Image (cartoon, grey):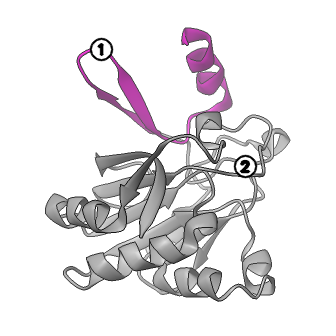
């Protein structure tokens, strides 16, 4: 099985507790105004990768935390469930997923793949991004988004969710850089001007 991926990054620290492996899926129909990763929206963008290969990268990283964002991860629920199962067969990994759906929408859709994927998660950050509700608080893009514990693994993260200012981190290569985390609205505007 393959995944369509926007990006992945080992060693992130701003999208969940501890040092984590980050995976961003490709494809999202919501096209929320002000989205911080609009390049992840087209379904034909990004690149395809075999689930086995990505699982190997996550396992080799040694990380015990995996954060999945997008795009919209639930559009690739079956492949992501397989990925998490392969990683968990080797290592106990905590999974956080950012989704534009609410948990109520996920449960109401009656898609067995969505439910299987949800059951592999420890925590989801749910709800579409609403630019007018961007309050600059940690862990979320807008104040309507919620941290919903599926297990009790990240209870401390849930209790701190939305209570502090945001932080981001930068990763540099020879001729480029990438940012991980949720920037303030002002920082996002400044970064867009640099492109």
**What residue is at 76 percent from the left and 88 percent from the top?**
110
Q: Nearer the viewer, residue 4 or 96?
A: 4
At mark 1, the secondary structure is loop
Relative height, residue 188 to residue 114 (above, below): above
Q: Which residue is denoted by mark 1 in the rendering?
A: 175
Quadrant including the N terminus: bottom left
Q: Is residue 87 left or right of residue 47?
A: left
Q: Is residue 166 above or below residue 108?
A: above
Task: Identify the magenta region.
Answer: 168-195
Q: Residues within 10 Å of mark 1 (few under 14, many from 20)?
A: few
- Give coordinates of residue 62: x percent, y percent: 16, 64
User: Vertical placement of 171 versus 141: above or below?
Assistant: above
Q: Quadrant of the C terminus?
A: top right
Q: Is residue 66 magenta?
A: no
| Numbered disc in front, either 2 or 1 | 1
Q: How many marks?
A: 2
Q: Whole-percent x and y of residue 101? A: 73, 66
Marks 2 and 1, how far apart at CA:
32 Å
Per the image, label 2 sits on a secondary structure element best described as loop
Residue 34: % across, % down: 74, 34
Nearer to me, 52 or 23: 52
Q: Nearer the viewer, residue 149 or 116?
A: 116
Q: Is residue 89 visible?
A: yes
Residue 52 sits in quarter:
bottom left
Read off the residue under disc 2: 142
Visible in this render: residue 159?
no
* Numbered tag placed on residue 141 in the rendering: none
Which residue is farthest right?
132
Q: Is residue 128 left or right of residue 17?
A: right
* x and y percentages locating residue 161 in the rendered image: 57, 61
């Amino acid at each position: 099985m393959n995944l369509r991926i926007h990006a992945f990054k080992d060693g992130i620290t701003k999208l969940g507790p501890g040092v984590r492996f980050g995976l961003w899926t490709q494809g999202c129909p919501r096209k929320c105004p002000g989205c911080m990763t609009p390049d992840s929206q087209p379904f034909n963008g990004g690149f395809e990768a075999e689930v086995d290969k990505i699982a190997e990268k996550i396992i080799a990283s040694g990380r015990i935390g995996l954060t999945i964002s997008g795009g919209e991860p639930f559009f690739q629920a079956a492949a992501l469930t397989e990925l998490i199962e392969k990683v968990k067969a080797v290592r106990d990994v905590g999974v956080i997923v950012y989704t534009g759906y609410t948990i109520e929408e996920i449960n109401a859709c009656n898609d067995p793949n969505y439910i299987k994927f949800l059951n592999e998660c420890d925590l989801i950050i749910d709800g579409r991004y609403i630019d007018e509700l961007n309050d600059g608080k940690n862990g979320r893009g807008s104040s309507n988004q919620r941290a919903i514990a599926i297990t009790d693994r990240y209870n401390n993260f849930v209790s701190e969710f939305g209570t502090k200012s945001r932080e981001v981190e930068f990763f540099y290569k020879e001729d480029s850089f990438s940012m991980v985390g949720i920037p303030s609205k002002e920082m996002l505007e400044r970064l867009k001007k640099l492109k």
